[in-house]
Amino acid sequence: MKSLSCPNSECALVGNRDAANVGLHGFYKTKSGKRRRYHCLTCGKTFCPTKGTPYYRLQHNRRTFDEVAHLSVEGVSKSAISRVKDVAWNTVHRWLERAAACCRRFNDRKTSGLDIPELQADEIRTFVGGKEKPAWIFTAIDVWSRVWPTTVVGRRSYRNTLALFRDVSSRAKSNCMPLIVTDGFEFYEKVARRVFGPACLYGQVIKARRNDRVIKVERRPVIGAAWRFEEALFESEDSSTLNTSFVERLNLTIRQASAYLTRRTTCHARCMQQLKNQLEMVRCHYNFLRPHRALKFGGETRTPAMQAGLARRRLSFREIFTSPVIRLSSRRIVYLFGRVEAHRARAA
């Protein structure tokens, strides 16, 4: 009982795992068999161990839920998942919304305190609802650890570019001054100067194309002295010159992992929130679950989170969905008609 705490937001010892105020309270039946129920000795409320997790009131096996989440981040569409797992499409949709909500909270809590010596940023073009409604996915990557720290979805505008760099800055250490490399999008220079100050290092890689082929690559230092760029590239373990190779490879990984972004397919996001939910799951899977081949040291292949010091080992979706960091204390999650709504709990 030491690993459990009362999930009731009105309890005086809510979230306290060391209080030893949880006792046994019989069993309840599910399709998978009997499950234990618990009783809080402080507030008198009873609860099950899945309270506050996506497994709460789940009428199927938890393994099936985890497999659905895994398939969704491997480029499999909801319709295909429904056929393969013999689960209704609406059920798959509702499960993935629950999983995305948990992955979003896990990403926000765990992806912080990053040491980013080299940062690359880029955009992915897609559409939502129809091709007449283009949407842009702003991505960034810490080159040394391969961590994907944040993403922003929306118009290709100054506001979204600023939101991306501000989020990266908030997740990095306070004394972090990275070497920033992007393409020639007009707002990157203004945003880099505003967020990281005039003392930052910022360069651009401009590619000229003809007949869909790159015929010329221009590397342009924009902010910073030439000797500072030479020193930063000399100390870099991955780059010998200004490049955007790592973030472009990340963009390919994202496209392969999301059915919404696969080219020449009938599967696409019907609304912006669906695309954001899918990207949160893909980001969580990429950082914490999926080993990166470039991070192989001897017999160990690390995940980006392991390389950045955010995790000690490779995690699983089961560990993320049951992690204490996703259990809300001041909020109550209600799953209703496939939508996840957060309601403020009333004051005690």
Image (spheres, rainbow, N blue to C red):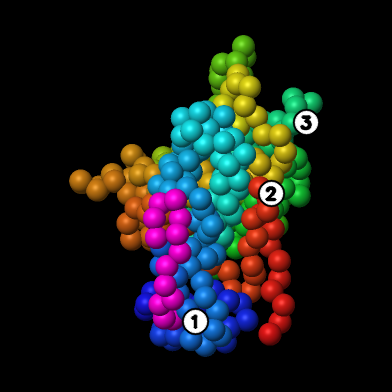
Q: Earlier in the sequence, mark 3 or mark 1?
A: 1
Does the magenta run of residues contain 132? no
Under circle 1, the secondary element is strand
The residue to which callout 3 is attached is: 133
Q: Quadrant of residue 342?
A: bottom right
Q: Is residue 198 left or right of residue 60?
A: right
Q: Position of residue 234 (x, y in %)?
A: 40, 48
The three-letter amino acid code for the residue at tag 2 is: Phe
Does the magenta run of residues contain 31? yes
Badge 2 density bin: few <14, some 14–19, many ≥20, Cα 10 Å: few
Camera-near label (2 vs 3) is 2
Q: Position of residue 46 (x, y in %)?
A: 52, 75
The three-letter amino acid code for the residue at tag 3 is: Lys
| Quadrant placement of the N terminus | bottom left
The residue to which callout 2 is attached is: 337
Residue shown at 72%/38% (left/top)? 271
Dominant SS in magenta: strand
Q: Is residue 70 left or right of residue 328?
A: left
Magenta segment range? Answer: 22-34
The residue to which callout 1 is attached is: 40
